[in-house]
Image (cartoon, rainbow, N blue to C red):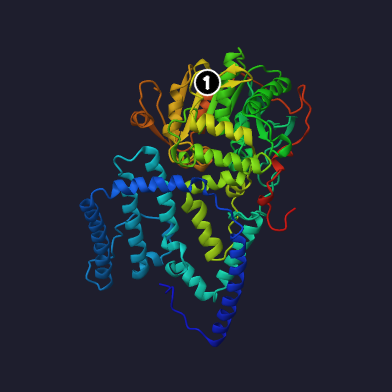
Amino acid sequence: MQEPFQSELTPEDAETISKNLTRIAERSQRALAELARLQADPSNSADIGRAFVEAATRLFSDPVENVQRQIRLGEQVLNFYGTLVADATGASAGAAAPPVRADRRFRDPAWEQHPVFNFIKGSYLLASDFIDREMRDMPGVEAKTAQTVRFYTKQFVDALAPSNFILTNPEVLRETLSSKGENLVNGLDNLIDDLERGDGDLVVKMTDLDAFEIGRNVAVTEGHVVYQNDLMQLIQYAPTTDTVYRRPLLIVPPWINKYYILDLRPENSLVRWCVDQGYTVFVLSWVNPGPEISYKKYEDYVIEGPLAALDAIEAATGERKASVVGYCIGGTLMATALAYMAATGDDRVAACTLLATQVDFSEPGELGVYLDETKVAALERRMREHNGLLDGAAMASAFNMLRSNDLIWSFFVNNYLLGREPMPFDLLYWNSDATRIPAPVHSYYLRNMYLDNQLVVPEALTVRGVPIDLRKIKTPIYLQAAQDDHIAPYHSVFKGTHSFAGPVRFMLAGSGHIAGVVNPPSAAKYRHWTNERIQGYADADEWLTDATEHPGSWWPDWHAWLSRRSGKRLPAREVGGGALAPIESAPGSYVRVRADRMKARGAA
């Protein structure tokens, strides 16, 4: 085993370390100066403080039980220590079995092989599991308060992981000694670069931003923009089959992200796969808005988004009816559009697929921690101060905190402690390609969906004066959810099965918000569950007890459902063969507009 902290230092090594310490001190001053520019948002600190006070009052209301819990934790740690000592002295029959769960943060062999680091790791995991149980067992604490306490406690516990510190991470310690501190110098350089690129905000670099280019190695499915307005470009993709289904397929992505999450590379592109199955695919590519359209409203996104796209598709193909797919917020928008269409007698949508989409927000999951009147009002003030727009990086930071170990601390260790550049990864390139949001749209969405849950209240909302009622939607709906989705939890998505008047097929996929959707059959990954019955279940877990588990991707199940509603096959349509001439080649110009902080160092 490679010892992490044994090294013979020569005088030359000592001189190198001394120089690097000087460089570290200089860069630390720069980093601190940049960090001082960060403006902490105190808007929710009082709410968090009140939540912790209430939780602590409940937790410590029984001093005897509290002491007993602490004693039980101490016994676990001592037993773990005893096992390690017995193993190190040969008193045990074999290697000590780890008494705690596996964790990706502790993959380096030294965490298991070296008794000191094994004890540090094991003690931390025992303590963090103990804290997690304590936070989940708070009788008498209001649900919202308990959720807030659990969330921020988890952030604190994750931040204190021994993997995040130089002296308690064997890999970092080994690298520091072998490089004579060069890794820490490089790490501070990376930190300063991230601060400067974020213009005062810490925007952690998650991938090599120069390794990808939209239209070159991501978003490469062949097609053309055939329509555009202030809010979106409509892309029609070239056929790859001799015949296609009669009814075109429109995909409506979230307006808070770039559409190409569904068209990263040919081998994992949902767009390309749909084209290869014989669908005439159109994708709505939202604009990355600037101040000139910061006045746009939610209802503008409905009318100028999917409804305008349906008009254009009819002009391009001659087909009045089409199928639609809405992803995440794009699905919520599409459900709103369907209700508007139902109220106005518009039956152009033959089938609708909603991916990771919430329409009932009564149980929004961990995102609800960020959302109450105080926090939304503070966010509205921020948007007013920033040209009436929400910077997409702010939204991305909130999503990243839902998976802080994977999307924050892993990069903290790699970039700042090990001093390495992140690896090229197309998904994380997309994740870093943030988009802005007009303030009226975002405020409307947060208040009417998350805070007040108005979309499921009949006629509580209107679009251009037309009352919205989801119960009037008779369109067949395929409702997809993902088992580990932290953004649109499957319990919340399932509630949508009771919101529509037409037939609904609910399908639960494995993995999370992205991988649960982008899971091509060729990958042979994950699993999914189906249940032909939808009525009579109180919640998703009850539905799941009667569901059938299937290995691999859910795409074939969806294709079987959609193809039956897509009409007969006819000769493939060429782009530009209808009334709409191509404007420019896919992926179009709207998707190329980046936020300044997305640009890599030295990029245009």
At x 66%, y 16%, the residue is: 320
The amino acid type, in three-letter code, at marker 1 is Ala
Judged left or right of residue 511, residue 64 is left
**Label 1: few (<14), some (14–19) or many (≥20) C-alpha neighbours in 10 Å:** few
Q: Quadrant of residue 33?
A: bottom right
Q: Is residue 364 above or below residue 59?
A: above
Q: Nearer the viewer, residue 561 or 601?
A: 601
- On the image, the x and y values in percent for residue 442 come to 59, 35
Q: Looking at the image, can residue 253 be seen? A: no
Quadrant of residue 329 within the rendered picture: top right
Task: Inspect this view and state whether residue 369 appears.
Answer: yes
In the shown orientation, is residue 587 left or right of residue 64? right
- The image quadrant of residue 315 is top right
Left or right of 150, for residue 189 = right
Closer to us: 533 or 500: 500
| Residue furthest to the bottom | 11
Residue underneath mark 1: 460
